Amino acid sequence: MNFRSAVLTPIILAAVLPAAAAGCSRDGHESAPAAATDTPAGPIGVPVEETPIRVRVNGTTIAGTIRHNPTGADLLRKLPVTVRVRDHNRQEKTGPLPAPLTMDGMPSGDAPKAADIGYFAPGNDLVFYYTDAPYWSGIARIGRLDGDLSVLADAGGELTVTVERSD
């Protein structure tokens, strides 16, 4: 190794390794982008438009809303929809929609909170969160549940969930 390589190699490694490690995590999730702590609901100071919905689970109705973002608006056009969901990671119920929703104009991922309604694009899944979830690539938050989440959290096995407009 010549003098230049002996001096430059440690400097290059010191600059490159931290940047490469920043995109990795131990649990398989992608790291959230530094500024991505929450999906903006809309421009600052502008009220977010939402449509009221009903989510029917095991004879229980939970009120909610769907946001007028591109993915939420696409779901609204397809309502009513019935989905068979199952538990995933003890934080959410997920199930495939009959047809994919658009992700045009949506963030590349998100970190949903309890009571959020999401769409997981890679699996074409509608997702109902009953606990907070870590950042995950391919998730879009499209709505919110406004009721008791225990019907989702406490139910085992598969459930049939129907989402419909409440207006």
Image (cartoon, grey):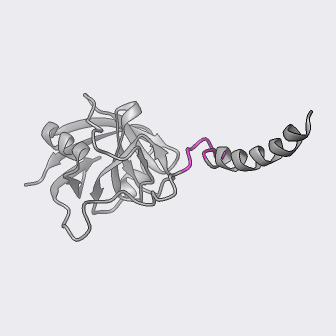
Provide residue 34's location: percent of width, then percent of height. 52, 57
Classify residue 71 by image quadrant. Answer: top left
Q: In which quarter of the image is the C terminus?
A: bottom left
Principal SS element in the magenta part?
loop
The answer to which of 118 and 42 lies nearer the viewer is 42
* Residue shown at 42% from the left, 39% from the top: 86
* Residue shown at 68% from the left, 46% from the top: 21
The answer to which of 30 and 61 lies nearer the viewer is 30
* Residue shown at 85% from the left, 38% from the top: 5
Is 93 in the magenta? no
Q: Residue furthest bottom?
A: 45
Is there any visible trace of residue 124 in the rendered image? yes
Classify residue 161 by image quadrant. Answer: top left
The answer to which of 154 and 23 lies nearer the viewer is 23
**Which residues fall within the magenta stretch?**
23-31
* Residue shown at 91% from the left, 35% from the top: 2
